[in-house]
Image (cartoon, helix red, strand yellow):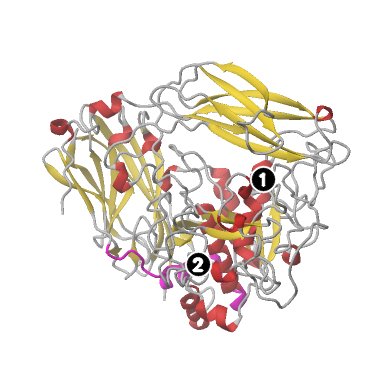
Amino acid sequence: MITSLLCLVLAVGCGPDAKQSIAPDLLVYAGDAPIHSDRIELPVIILNWGAAPAPATQLAVYINERPNWRDSSTRTLLNRDIPALDSKSSTTVTVEIALDELEPDSDYYLLLQVGSVDGELNPNNWDVSGFSLNEDKQVVMDCDSSAPHVGDDGATDPLFDEQWHLNNTGQQRYTTVAGTPGEDLGMSNVLSSGTPTGDGIRIAIVDTGMETCHPDLADNVEVGASYNFNTNEWHNSNSTEPYLPWAMGDHGTSVAGTAAAAAHNGTGGRGVAPNAILRGYNMLAAVESAGTYFDSLGGSVDEPDSTFVDIFNMSFGTLGGEFSVDPNETQLFRNGVTVLRDGWGAIYVKSAGNAFDGCRSMRRPANARIGCSSSNSSSSHHSPYLVMVGAFDAQGTRASYSSAGSNLWISAPAGEYGATYGAIITADQVGTNRGYDVLRNRGVGLDTVNNPHGNYVSTFNGTSAAAPNASGAIALLLEAEPKLTWRDVKHILAKTARQIDAGIERVQYLVGSTVYVAQLPWTTNAAGYRFHNWYGFGAVAVDAALALVESHDPDSLGAFVETEPFERIEEASIPDNDGTGVSQVLTVEGLADDANIEAVTVHVSITHPQTNDLGIHLTSPSGTESILNPIFNDALAGNADLNWDLLSNAFYGESPNGDWTLRVVDAAAEDDGTLDKWSLTFALGTHP
């Protein structure tokens, strides 16, 4: 079925009118704050990530002893004018919070709010934070291991039966809509047999922090192996304790619980790999961030020693934009997959992003069906060394927010928002005064029987939740066969992935006088692998993957080869508002006849005043097509010209030799451009 996009005739906001209504997008958030014995120096960052300038507005910061800033006890800490901000620019206001003016043994909650401006597509410009004070009026910096916990070794985990992502039976205790049975991690054999459990496999949670004394994490935390990058910035903090002092949810704690919360301890639920070894690096909370990214991901042998890690869980991302490959980052990952794990290679598991429905600068009707920003638009997402993870929900379809892209490898459960449709039940900050449920108190947060001390949350979601589900699954594979290389792991996941949402249709529009395919259905490539930009190769299927491990010979995929670029330099005009576009062929030859593709990276150089108009397609010599960049990618709104790297996994297992076709389509009127040059780089193996 063809859905017509008659931009010029119907004037539905997808041609020049959409470009003229390009919007600002103000974001406000609490930065990483130094904490002193007598004060907090809280940086409040106001960012205009939109493609249009933002006019002047106001910032207000409120504080209260409970997260209700509308009652009479609320105090205003700051009310200040914010100047106009250019596109992709920011300003920072530091709010000093004097601790001696506050009450001891109390909790405080902050609301940061910026006034919306005309034209914003997302006008909810606010953020929250909070902290607790001890009897000396100093910020609490340690996990409270003396907090009351419920549970006994060997006892049933009271929330396990509601963890649909592990075993979807159609649960709906905490939601109004039941899940679809079977839409889960596919690990029923593991759950019934009790093995493997991830025993002996180290997972580094590279995140905001981790509560090492949490009753569902403590037994799995490797003593002294975590690292706090803020020991010089946070008064009374401990270098091996990545405790997050901010009180409105610790992302890292919830991620850790999803991957490896303990099982059969009579409290909460369980993780995918309940005996895996956990360590936390609070890179995302570092006040001084220089070097922390590399130190957290295998690039440091001291403070911390991050080389002794099997799986790095990277449940974070960047605001989308045009990013090229950072050679230092590439070298970091290349070293990790070459040297770590005794040469078998560390596994880097990365969330794909949450921008499918997040149009920030320009929204066109097509975005509702093909998404706003592609996962290929985020920094580091072009790396063949990563396992990029998308998210699906309890009904077995793409989670509404999950970014699509040709760079996805696999999908894992994460769910929706935990009210109408299920989200992930996992660890929250310890106590009823801290955690995500303090602000969004629903679901398990209201269950005083199974969650009496407020240590769990049932609203955790995002590809942030999908990634640790995949990390836990990979830990099970590595326990079953410790000599699996990083490539073996990716291969096994791709080979055994379960196809979900099988009936998804192509999306077609009329661009100019041509029917243009803006989104492909599931495609089976010449090597027999199914692929879709929403799901990668499909959903993680743990039992099937473990079955393949039994017959798979480790390190049997041949030598890993990364080629030099194959380049074509020949300017070609891109027809304006034309669904046919411009195509060029690049002949790849001279590579081994038995070479199999493991990843393809495309570098494009394009001159164009509005690259948001452009769709970029690549077709292999075997006839497999991949959409590397969708039309109307909001990350490119207002962007002139491209010098960009894009990755596709859709050609996995095919031969690289032959004629490759790049096609660039301009899907909106009134802007002309040229394809200046492009190149292909291959990661190759030799698959049995």
Say which residue appears at 37% left-offset and 30% top-offset.
Answer: 639
Q: In this view, does 227 lie above or below 288?
A: below
Q: Where is residue 243 in the image (x, y as percent from the top left)?
A: 74, 49
Q: Report whether residue 285 is seen.
A: yes
Viewed as shown, does residue 605 lie left or right of 457?
A: left
Residue span colored magenta: 479-503
Task: Name the one closer to the observer, 633 or 156.
Answer: 156
Where is residue 47 shown, x and y percent of the image?
Answer: 53, 28
- According to the picture, the residue beneath numbered tag 2 turns out to be 164
Residue 516 image position (x, y, % from top left)? 19, 46
| Residue that mark 1 sits on | 283
Amino acid under disc 1: Met
Mark 2: amino acid: Trp
What SS does tag 2 mark?
loop
Quarter holding the N terminus is bottom left
Using a 10 Å C-alpha cutoff, classify the residue at mark 2 as few (fewer than 14 neighbours), some (14 to 19) or many (20 or more).
Answer: many
Q: Which of 357 and 525 is in front in this view?
A: 357
Can residue 312 be seen from the camera position used here?
no
Q: What element carries label 1?
A: helix
Q: Which of marks 2 and 1 is in front?
A: 2
Q: Is 331 rendered above or below residue 230?
A: below
Magenta segment: does it hold 72?
A: no
